[in-house]
């Protein structure tokens, strides 16, 4: 079957059964290699027919009004690289907190080999991803629900967090300014994220290099507050030198399979 024929059949199949599809099941369905399907999905994503998820895709029409899934698909490869390296920092039996950021979602996608783990999160979207993995105990932090970004936030969560402590806290950010401050777009989110940061014995920031001067108006932390920053190659050399005394900078690398 030629590539365009296969892409057309993929498009029709995905629209006929609206759900998240995995690369492996599509490869088996069309009797091609997973690598071929990944290339087809990359082309379909370029044409804005689908949004990629870790290990698969979802039809773009299904989430056209969902800012969250659009965030997940932006810089998909970078975020997946970060998620893979972040998962390698874990040991079996740990209790961790993963906040609702789109980069943090990609960490959740790589936890299959890390069990047993206890994972706390305020992300509703992350629950189905974590549920795929036996041995992952999931605890959802309560709060006010954001319908657009599928997370919980608010003063109720702050009170809950004050009673908890985690081996590792993984946090994202909307942007990092030239002084190394981590920024988000909302004061309530900043306040909750600051509390999350305090509850971790170890604190790791997950943010690709494009987050440098990317946006956000409210600071919740500085790079100095993190034990490590997992990012991607691409930081300007002078910026890396300036930030190096603040935290341990870890560069994630591409995987040949992706």
Image (tube, rainbow, N blue to C red):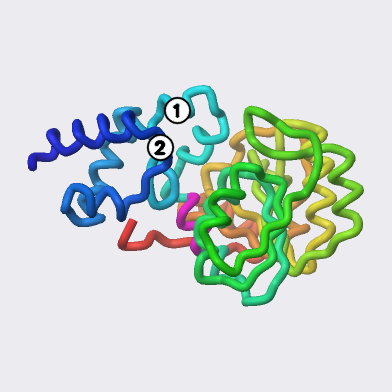
Q: Cβ–Cβ below 8 Å for labels 1 and 2?
A: yes
Question: Residue 152: within the magenta?
Answer: no
| Between 75 and 141, the one nearer to me in the picture | 141
Asked which secondary structure carries label 1, the reply is helix
When the figure is inspected, residue 255 is found, relative to residue 80, above or below; the finding is below
Q: Which residue is mark 1?
A: 62
Q: Which residue is mark 2?
A: 58
For the point 24% across and 46% down, the residue is 39
Question: Residue 80: within the magenta?
Answer: yes
| Between 151 and 221, the one nearer to me in the picture | 151
Crowd around label 2: few <14 · some 14–19 · many ≥20 (10 Å)? many
Residue that lies at the very extreme toward the front in this rendered image: 17
Can you give x and y, in whole percent of width and height, for residue 253 in the image?
43, 62
Crowd around label 1: few <14 · some 14–19 · many ≥20 (10 Å)? some
Which image quadrant is residue 108 in? bottom right
User: Left of 211 or right of it: where is 156?
Assistant: right
Residue that lies at the very extreme toward the bottom in this rendered image: 92
Instruction: Tell me the quadrant of the picture where the C terminus can be found.
Output: bottom left
Can you give x and y, in whole percent of width and height, for residue 36 in the image?
20, 50
For the point 36% across and 49% down, the residue is 22
When the figure is inspected, residue 12 is found, relative to residue 25, above or below; the finding is above
Q: CA distance from mark 1 to mark 2?
A: 7 Å
């Amino acid at each position: 079957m030629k590539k365009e024929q296969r892409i057309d059949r993929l498009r029709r199949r995905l629209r006929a059964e609206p759900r998240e599809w995995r690369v492996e099941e599509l490869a088996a369905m069309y009797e091609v290699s997973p690598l071929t399907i990944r290339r087809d999905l990359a082309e379909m994503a370029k044409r804005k027919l689908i949004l990629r998820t870790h290990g698969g895709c979802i039809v773009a029409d299904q989430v056209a009004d969902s800012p969250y899934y659009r965030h997940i698909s932006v810089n998909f490869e970078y975020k997946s690289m970060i998620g893979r390296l972040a998962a390698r920092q874990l040991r079996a039996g740990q209790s961790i907190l993963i906040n609702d950021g789109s980069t943090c979602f990609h960490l959740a996608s790589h936890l299959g080999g890390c069990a047993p783990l206890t994972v706390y999160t305020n992300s509703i979207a992350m629950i189905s991803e974590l549920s795929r993995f036996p041995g992952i105990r999931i605890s959802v932090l309560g709060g006010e629900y954001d319908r657009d970004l599928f997370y919980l936030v608010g003063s109720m969560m702050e009170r809950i967090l004050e009673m908890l402590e985690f081996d590792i806290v993984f946090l994202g950010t909307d942007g990092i300014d030239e002084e190394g401050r981590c920024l988000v777009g909302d004061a309530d989110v900043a306040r909750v994220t600051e509390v999350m940061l305090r509850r971790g014995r170890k604190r790791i920031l997950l943010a690709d290099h494009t987050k440098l001067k990317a946006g956000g108006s409210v600071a919740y932390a500085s790079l100095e507050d993190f034990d490590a920053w997992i990012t991607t190659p691409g930081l300007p050399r002078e910026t890396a030198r300036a930030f190096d005394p603040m935290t341990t900078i870890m560069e994630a690398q591409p995987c040949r399979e992706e």
